[in-house]
Amino acid sequence: MAGYEDRVPAYLTFRVAAQEGPIAAFAEQEAWEAREHYPDLMGVGLAEFFHARELDTGGWELSEYGNDTPQGARDSLGSHFRKRAQQAEADGDAKAHKTWMAAAERMDREVVNDLRVRGERFRVLRASRFVRMGRSGPEPPRPSDPDPAEVGEGYQVRSRTKGFVVDPYTSAGLSESLLKFDLLQLVGVPSSAPDDVLADARHAAHAYPGGVLLPAVFMISERVDGKWQSHNPGASHSTPQGARDSLTGWLRVMAPFTLRLPEEKKAEYARAADVLDDKRGNNLTVDGVRYRVTRMERLIRIGPDGPEGPRPSDYDPEPPVLVQKRQLEEQGLWDEDEETSPELDARARELNALWEQEEARRLAAKERRRRKRGG
């Protein structure tokens, strides 16, 4: 029987290999068990967007952080071009400085998802997001998931996508390969979604039939009126502790500020945050709402021309910054000398004071832990 493996495009190739080491073996076992305990895969509303650079050696190197809109990724790419321009200027290369700055300024005024600058190709990439669901709800973090940060220090952990290369030729374990296969079969949006969203998702499944899994991230889910949903649809965190810290920050600062909580409720929310800090658990109930730290999978689809970019129906409310400015000027709403209203200024001071209190509390708690270890 003739072999066809050499004729299969790289983007349709699944390279399965045993993952070496006891930690990898443990993670493989947990991934296999997750298929049984959390068998349902469900798409998470908003996608995530990165800018990436095509490598001469193959694949696309991702930016460190993702964004919840395509324009956020474009703005991030424009910032990258400015950094390259600054480096060129420091190196005394006037021609390179001019080229990189021209690319940055283009990102300020145009919607560009794919371009070449000085022989390098850049693209804005789209990552679909999914969670596993079981009878008890969404899948929480696994014991093998890295979670090195102290309480309140989750933001200091380096993003797991920094330096990640989107390359379908990279091998993976059996469970990860099966997960990728399962996700590629999904349209990823509910049948009740708008027609343009469904059409774009079906087109993507056909035009980008391959894919690469990114490292898992973590978010907060909440159960309201008997249904699980994302607490903050656009947010994700590199570690479970980062997700816990986001929830305690909401309980101590943003909930009192946005919900105008009375003092008794503020104290209740703060006590719940203290419990989460103390136990470092994955489940918490506050004021009748259940919260869970949730593991989230991400998939970048790949086709003949490389990774999938933004879809026409993706949520992308803001144009490039110079377009925004021009629109506001045309509407008579742009005034560089306009002062903030006293009401808005007071609310800003109120929020700033709450965050300052939270930062002081966090630093004091960190010092107590340090002294306790020292003792």
Image (spheres, rainbow, N blue to C red):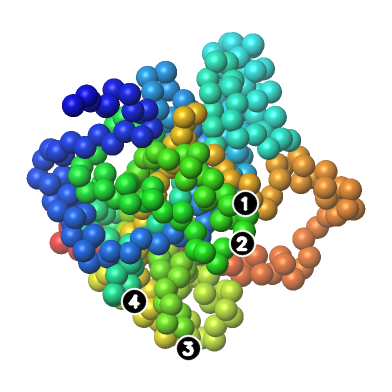
Near mark 2 (Cα within 10 A), the count class, few <14, some 14-19 or many ≥20, is few
Who's the residue at 46% across and 83% down the image? 225
- Gap between marks 4 and 3 measured at Cα: 19 Å
Residue pointed to by mark 4? 284
Who's the residue at 58% across and 52% down the image? 199
Count up the numbered dots.
Answer: 4
- Gap between marks 4 and 1 measured at Cα: 35 Å
Q: Nearer the viewer, mark 1 or mark 3?
A: 1
Q: Which of the marked residues, 4 or 2, is nearer the chain's N terminus?
A: 2
Quadrant in the picture for the C terminus? bottom left
Residue type for callout 4:
Leu
Q: Looking at the image, which residue sits at the far left? A: 22
- Gap between marks 3 and 2 measured at Cα: 42 Å
Q: Which of the marked residues, 3 or 2, is nearer the chain's N terminus?
A: 2
Q: Looking at the image, which residue sits at the far bottom? A: 264
In percent of width and height, residue 231 lies at: 47, 68
